[in-house]
Amino acid sequence: MAFQKAVKGTALIGGGAIATVFGLSQFSQYRNKHGALVQVQAAEDAPVRRDHLPTREQQILALQTSGEFDVLVIGGGATGCGCALDAATRGLKTALLERDDFSSGTSSRSTKLIHGGVRYLQKAIMKLDFEQYRMVKEALEERAHLLQSAPHLSAPLPIMLPIYKWWQLPYYWIGIKLYDLVAGSQCLKSSYVLTKSRALELFPMLRKDRLVGAIVYYDGQHNDARMNLAIALTAARYGAATANYTEVRHLLKTTDTGSGRPHVCGVRCRDVLTGKEFDVRAKCVINATGPFTDSVRKMDDQEVPNICQPSAGVHIVMPGYYSPDNMGLLDPATSDGRVIFFLPWEKMTIAGTTDSPTDVTSHPIPTEEDINFILSEVRNYLGADVEVRRGDVLAAWSGIRPLVTNPDSKDTQSISRNHVVTISESGLVTIAGGKWTTYRAMARDTIDAAIQEHNLKAGSSKTMGLQLEGAKDWSPTLYIRLVQDYGLESEVAQHLASTYGDKAFEVAKIAQVTGKRWPIVGKRLVSEFPYIEAEVVYGVKEYARTAVDIISRRTRLAFLNVQAAEEALPRIVDIMGKELNWCEQKKKEELETAKKFLYYEMGYKVKTDQLTDRSEISLTPSDIERYKKRFRMFDKDKKGFITILDVQRVLQSISVQIAENTLHEILNEVDLNKNGQVELNEFLQLMSAIQKGHVSGSRLAVLMKSAEENLQQRQAIPVDRSGGGL
């Protein structure tokens, strides 16, 4: 009864606020509906799309031999690739340079949401800030576009906002309903209120005590790195000369004959893979480098003040059982005022983000402090029966948000939450700020400004309604054809369809025969993830040139489980070596570089810090005696340590065989001083860390326990990773 009264009261309170926004929303909706018709027609008038994707070598050659480009974009993130796509589809001769890989920076390290920004709408209403309202409105329009342009890579996601105080119900209900209203006809699905029992039914992990009810609203979710790559590949198909691993050394300038002022006319660049340097000339150069905005601006003018204020956002990935398969969670007010999302993603659970000032770097590193902050906030919302363990963190990463101040604003100190397009005296066009969701609008505004400033001959933007790589013939049931036509596992087929869209058939065609009754084709890189070896071969065609490109952006293995990524690396390097003709030394270097990436940038270092030779042993005397007894079962010779031979002897006695290289991996996870053996002290440190929740899923611990229990029963011992994390 109280719940019904609260809902009725909420409706009355919210009426006035909703009416306040209604006029603005209706006008904007009318304007956008008519504008969208024009834009869809424009997309149909875009240049011819190539069926064949040029190789990287062909793209490098095009950069060197095509003469002057109309537009040259620096930066291969979402915004830079969006600019290249917008320019190319307008018929402009376009080039794009990225010093690393496409989406190697912030664009692959997001929260994976396509959203308007509920908190920004809250601020817009509370402060009567029309600029923030416009930003949310634009983001919601772009959210609809992104979901339509790449439906294989994105989908609506319901997000639950749990309510623990009665007064919060009308407050949040009004805000969420206004969010729906601002979206207008592009609202994904209408938000709704849940009773306590229904909320717990949909999100059973939720903390039950003091729970009043919940509100569910809808936003979008996507595979950010693959979306970025789809934009880059689509730009290439429309004729843009796009090249990753091509670094800009400095800007080229000429003197304007009319004004006598220097004018940016291109760049000197270097092919990072070959070391060759060459010039690329263009009528207009666009700086779309995200956190590195100021470094390019200073290439143009050393005296220009910085406009980028970088902020680090850390995310963690946990096993899928921490959240329902199709329901996210929003913590609108954390202990320090930040917002935390807790979302299902790629059958795992992603939690984040933090927001703290940082230095600009190409290799941001997640800190233990940020990881523990996120875990602490997650614990506040999950039930007491769900133990949130530090050891369940499977991967962690930090992304740098390029917040900017507007140099053309009177108040140059205030942070602009919207994007900023600025043009220097020498004609360098810079696009900065904004958010992933609005990449297309940012690109449109940038190319509009470039056309006006440099008198380029081109019409209006043609990207609204334009389908990205893989979207044209995709359907939700496409994966069934992959299963039926090629004999792929259903899980693998679904993964290929949702990653490559209609290009999944190209991957399936090159998939290797397994030699099994089922699946017929598709050898997995690691057993518990649907990534297959054929994706490595196809990734090279998609411009992947390093092992890191494969584990982090062509597949998302590094973002889902760093241990699984490390296990897959040797095979990935072997396949890439054959495709790219790597020598043994090059393969060794790639392996080491990828391991370093996992160790520092994807959270492996903070994992090893949980279990070191200095880790405290916090076990009761009875536990210590029990674990010593288990250890001695393997250490028959009372050496004080166990080796692979000891483990093999015990396994042989119970008729179990495990490959020697697998045993090496298992012992290496616990061998803290890396001397090829596990000492008693290391084993006790492991068991102590497991009890405290700092480590989970240790294969050695599972193996030894299973051997102890099965010496008489003679049952098989599981050696697959159990989902344990960092």
Image (tube, rainbow, N blue to C red):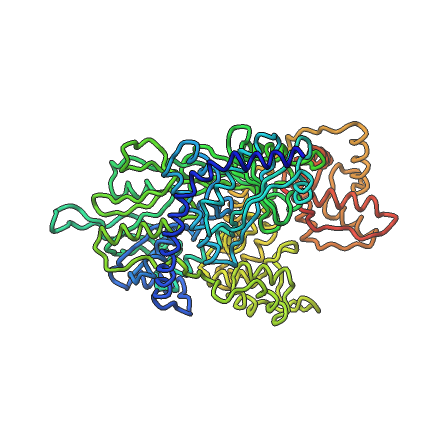
667, above or below 14, in the image = below
In the foreground, 411 or 269: 411
- Dividing the picture into quadrants, the one containing residue 638 is top right
Residue depicted at x 61% and y 30%: 165
Left or right, 550 with respect to 413, comes to right
In the rendered image, residue 547, in percent from the top left (x then y), is placed at 51, 54
Left or right, 593 with respect to 124, comes to right
In the rendered image, residue 144, in percent from the top left (x then y), is placed at 46, 53
Q: Can residue 580 be seen in this snapshot?
A: no
In the rendered image, residue 621, in percent from the top left (x then y), is placed at 79, 27
In the rendered image, residue 515, in percent from the top left (x then y), is placed at 67, 69
**Direction right: furthest residue:** 712
Quarter holding the N terminus is top right
Quarter holding the C terminus is top right
Q: Can residue 133 be seen in this snapshot?
A: yes
Residue depicted at x 56% and y 39%: 330
Residue depicted at x 39% and y 64%: 237
Total numbered labels placed on residues in the image: 0
404, above or below 58, in the image = above
In the foreground, 281 or 235: 235
- Dividing the picture into quadrants, the one containing residue 243 is bottom left
443, above or below 638, in the image = below
219, above or below 478, in the image = above
